[in-house]
Image: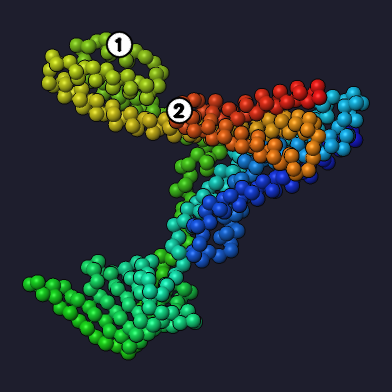
Amino acid sequence: MKKIDKLFVKSYIGPFVLTTAIVVFIFLMRFLMIYFPEFIGKNLDMMVFAKLFFYFTMMTIPMSLPLATLLATLMCFGNLGEKSELTAMKSAGIPITRLIVPTMILSIFVAIFSIGYNNTVNPWANLKGWSLLYDIKTTKPALNIQEGIFYNQIPGYRIKVEKKVGDGQSLKNVIVYDHNTGSGNKNITVADSGRMYTINKESQLVFELYNGVNYSEGSSYNNMAQMTRYSFQKNKIVFLLSSFGLKRSKEEDFTYHEYMKSIPELNEKIDSLNKQIRDKSGQQIIAYKRLDLYAFPEMVGDTLSKKGIVAGAWVDSLLTKVEKITSVQEFNSSARTKLESQKSQIVSDMSFLNGVEKAVWAADLERWNKVTTGFSCLAMFLIGASLGSIIKRGGFGMPVLISIAFFILYYLLQQMGNKYAKEGLISAVVGAWMPFSVLITIGALLMRRAKNF
C-alpha cells in the first residue's frame, strides 16, 4: 500500500467509526422518544432495558451505515481539501478517480458487510427486539394506589384509599369492592385504617385492615335479597399479582413478519404465497367450468384460454363478465342463481387473493431492501467523495448539514418506493432500487464535476 493510500485510509476510518457510533446513538434516542411512554411506571429492571437497547442498536446499524459512509467520506476528503493536500495531489497529476480507490475499497467492504448483516443478524435482532417491546407494551403498570382514586388494575377488585401515610404502607379510610362474582357491588369492605405489603416474592399483595365492616348481599329469592353484615377489628385480604410484571411471549408468534426473515426464508414465503394464489385460481376455474354457460361460449373461451394470467386480474375480469350476464333478463332463474352464487364467491376470493398478493409484494420488497441498503453505501460514498473534494471543508459543520440533506432525500425516496411497492403501484424491484438509482446518478454527476474542479 502506497503512502497516499495509507493517508486516505487513516483519514477515513476514524471519522467512519465515530460517525457510525453517533448515528446509531441518534437513532436509538429517536426510538427512546417514541416508546418512552410505554416504559413509565412498569417497574422494569435494568437488564430488560439493556436487552431492549442492545437489540434496537443492532437493528439501527443497517440504516446508519449509508449516513455514516456519507459523513465519513465528506469529512475525509473535506479535511484533505481544506489542508490543500488534495490540491497538491491533483497538481502532481493524480486524478480524483485514483485518489478515491482506497476509500472505495473500504466502502465496498462496508456494503458487503451491510448485505450480510441484513440477511443474518438483522432478522434475529428484529425478532428479539420487537417481541420484547411487545411484551413491555402489554405489561401492566406497577402497583401504584393513589389517594382518593379508585384503583382497578387488580382483576376483580376496585380499591380506594383516602390517605396514605408517609411510610407508603399505612392507610386511612379504605374501601374494597369485590367484583369476582360478576354481580356488581354486592361485596364491599370498609375499614378505618390498614396496612399494605407484599409477600411471597411480591407475588401477592396483602391488605391488613383494622376496625372495619364487610357488607355482602346474597342471591335474591322472590325479589328479596339476603344482606350479611359483620364487623371486624382485624381482617386480611390477599390479592394475587400474577397479572403484573413482564411476561415473555413465544418468539415463534412473531416470525410471520418479513422483517424477521432472511433472504432464503423470504424466498420460501414468496413461493408458498404464490402457490396459494395458483391453487385458489385453479379452484375458481374448476367452479367456473361447472356452470351452465353453454349459452355464452365466448366467455369460456375468452377467460379460460389465457395461461399464466395474474390471479387478481383474472378474478376482476370474471366478475365483470358475471355482472354482464346477471343483467340479461332472459336468462333463466336457475342459471341466474348459480351466477349470483359464483359472483359472491368471486368477491370473497378476490379479497383473499388481494391480501395474499400484498403479502407477496411486502416479502419481495424486504428481500430486495436487504441488498439495496448495502449498495446505497456505495452511492453515498460517491456523493461524499465528490462533494468533499469540491467544497474542501472538513470538521462537523458543513459535512453534517450536507449529509443530513442527502440522508433525508434517501429516506424519503426509500419510504416512497416502499409505499408504492406495497400497494402494487410499482414492482418491488423498482421500489427497492429507486433510492440507489437516484443517489448513484447524483454521485456520478458530482464526480464528473469533481474531476474538472
| Residue 198 on image: x %, y % | 45, 77
Give the number of the disc on residue 424.
Answer: 2
Residue 153 at x, y percent in the picture: 38, 66
How crowded is the residue under tag 2: few (<14 C-alpha within 10 Å), some, or many (20+)?
A: some
Q: Are marks 2 and 1 in contact (CB under 8 Å)?
A: no
Q: Amino acid at mark 2?
A: Gly
In this figure, which residue is indicated by the disc labeled 1? 301
The image quadrant that residue 119 belongs to is: top right
The residue carrying pointer 1 sits among few (fewer than 14), some (14 to 19) or many (20 or more) residues within 10 Å by Cα, namely few
- Relative placement, left or right, of 279 versus 166 is left
Q: Is residue 270 visible?
A: no
- Quarter occupied by residue 405: top right
The spot of residue 356 in percent (x, y) is 40, 32
The kind of residue on which mark 1 rests is Gly
Residue nearest the viewer, comparing 367 with 426: 426
Give me the residue at 58% from left, 63% from top: 46
State the residue in front, 248 or 423. 423
